[in-house]
Image (cartoon, grey):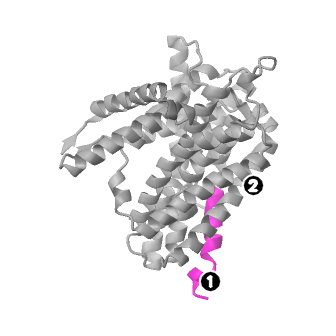
Amino acid sequence: MLELDFYGTLVAASLVLLLGRCLVARVGFLRTYNIPEPVTGGLVVALVLLVLRAVGVHIQFDTTLQAPLMLAFFATIGLSADIGSLKRGGRSVGLFLLVVTGFLLVQNAIGISLAQLLGLDPLMGLLAGSISLSGGHGTGAAWGSTFSAQYGLASASELALASATFGLVLGGLIGGPVARLLVSRVQPPGLEPETPRVPKGFEQPNKERLITPFSMIESLALISISLLTGTLLNSLLRGTPFELPTFVCVLFVGVVLRNGLSAGGLYQVFEREVLVLGNVALSLFLALALMSLKLWDLAALALPFLILLGVQTLVMALFAIFVTFRVMGRNYDAAVLAAGHCGFGLGATPTAIANMQAVTQRYGASQIAFLVVPMVGAFFIDIVNVIVIKLYLALPFFTGA
């Protein structure tokens, strides 16, 4: 067993990002299908660790940084959210939320139907549905323990976490190919010199952003305040009907800070700098998450369960192409939104952002996509998902009626 400490893990995560960049730059397939750099590097390392484990070598990473990096990323989303922009994107946010809600219903219907067809407990269909895929590891672990305690489903938590791992991997892999197919049907802004779009936000993270030491300290202070206040707010809401995930509380505090300071004439957030810090946090979080994947957990899944997850992946891709893209306008922004939907429909909001960045880095900016996806993925998806899950649990399959 080789255990890497905090510093060793940070070095490893940085090398994973550099490896991903080199691979995407040199391997035409990865570049053609817009596979995100953190996903590429992280999966290669995860596969190497799987091989090493097979020969008796175990490597353990220190994941202390993983949660703070994710929260810092959501804090920067909040700090970059201008209320005026949110108003302008209100219709698109509402429309995308309807699309996402529709997919949650489809995802669980597919899961339950296939579970029954394959001779599995219908609860496993929910676990391999919106609970673990759209919900992610946190939601999967919470519902897994509930299914074990209240419904007597053995190894529910392990199945949920393995499903979430599967989704995180596939969500980062199918978004790029789906977007490439859809972009071929529209006119990307990068190919329209007469109507250029200036990138704003997370669309093109490699664009130059000027910073100074003092402004960097100011931005770090705002992120730190968002983290501290958000975690305190989460602890106050815990156990109440208004309980929300920590990252939602952090994002909310960021939105209030940004717009409150601006409305009072006290301070204007240095958005370019906040976004640089957000992109650093996002890249390191994804590198840590993907290189720490326990791919051997997937190997432990029974064949019927793997078939179920494989079908869910195919359904996600088809839904993004034939529903998300069409409902959201059949234009370039809709293509980027479809890539983002693949990211958090199977994995998580950071995966969605990475998918969209891989597309916009190549084809051009999509400001509406980077406004809509974080808002729906952070604020609304968890709340709607809980309602959908409870609606399905009220069906006769589970109530015994």
Would residue 193 appear left or right of 312 to someone viewing this image? Answer: right
> Where is residue 114 drawn, in percent x and y?
56, 72
Residue 385 lies within the magenta run: yes
- Which residue shows up at 34% across the image and 44% down it? 47
Res. 240 image quadrant: bottom right
Mark 2 neighbour density, 10 Å: few (under 14) some (14–19) many (20 or more): some
Q: Note whether residue 184 is visible.
A: yes
**Three-letter code for the amino acid on which mark 2 is drawn:** Leu
Q: Which mark is residue 396?
A: 1
Residue closer to the observer: 144 or 56: 56
Q: Which mark is residue 98?
A: 2
Q: Position of residue 356 (x, y in %)?
A: 61, 36
Chain part drawn in magenta: 383-401
Q: Which amino acid is tagged 1? A: Pro
Q: Is residue 227 left or right of residue 315?
A: left
Picture quarter with the N terminus: top left
